Image: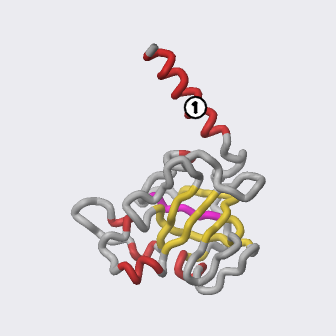
Amino acid sequence: MIRHLILALSVAALLSAAELPTGLFVAQAPPDAVDVIAARTAPTPGATVTVRGIIGGRQKPFVDGRALFTIMDRSLVCETACGTGWSGCGQPPEDLRGAVASVQVVDAAGKPLLTTLAEAGGLIPGAAVIVQGTVAAGSNPALLVITAQAIHRLPEAP
């Protein structure tokens, strides 16, 4: 019984990963990336955007069961004793609100895929990424949502 459950969970995990589009994770960084704060100044829905940030902005930057995560501007990462400076915990909430963006990977109907992006392509909280995609409908200077076509994880600093 337990072997069947483990097998079923393993197959489900493989199927979830298979849902992500081929070529989503790219080895070469997309050019002309801007930081999150700069991208939020005047987002135009439907426009192509390339944004650089840190996966974070909250304690749980990945949404369970959905291909969604948040990134925050690199300037807000702080040194903390707890090791979660990527969460924005050392920042005033008003500063943090103006420096985050949501990243989504969607299906043909424009809905976030029913899988997590956590650990896919090496994505973890605190990782530096460059995301290239389009500005989602409803985005404005107070809310930036990027529909990702390419995600590049930057190498960790030495």
Whether residue 92 is situated above or below residue 118 in the rendered picture: below
Whether residue 90 is situated above or below residue 60 in the rendered picture: below
Classify mark 1: residues with Cα within 10 Å, few (<14), some (14-19) or many (20+). Answer: few
User: Can you give x and y, in whole percent of width and height, for residue 24 in the image?
Assistant: 67, 51
Left or right of residue 117: residue 124: left
User: Can you give x and y, in whole percent of width and height, for residue 109 in the image?
Assistant: 76, 55
User: Can you give x and y, in whole percent of width and height, for residue 64 in the image?
Assistant: 49, 49
Determine the image quadrant of residue 11.
top right
Task: Name the residue at the bottom extreme.
Answer: 41
Left or right of residue 81: residue 77: right
Q: Nearer the viewer, residue 122 or 98?
A: 98
Whether residue 77 is situated above or below residue 44 in the rendered picture: above
User: Can you give x and y, in whole percent of width and height, for residue 5 in the image?
Assistant: 48, 21
The residue that appears at 62% across and 59% down in the rendered structure is 104
Determine the image quadrant of residue 45.
bottom right
The residue that appears at 22% across and 63% down in the rendered structure is 81
Magenta span has 128? yes
Q: Disc 1 on helix, strand or loop?
A: helix
Whether residue 44 is situated above or below residue 10 in the rendered picture: below
The residue that appears at 50% across and 54% down in the rendered structure is 63
- Quadrant location, the C terminus: bottom left
The residue that appears at 32% across and 61% down in the rendered structure is 84
Magenta span has 24? no
Left or right of residue 80: residue 9: right
**SS majority, magenta:** strand
Residue designated by label 1:
12
Q: What's under tag 1, amino acid-wise?
A: Ala
Please say which color scheme the image uses: secondary structure
Left or right of residue 149: residue 54: left
Q: Which residues are magenta?
A: 127-131
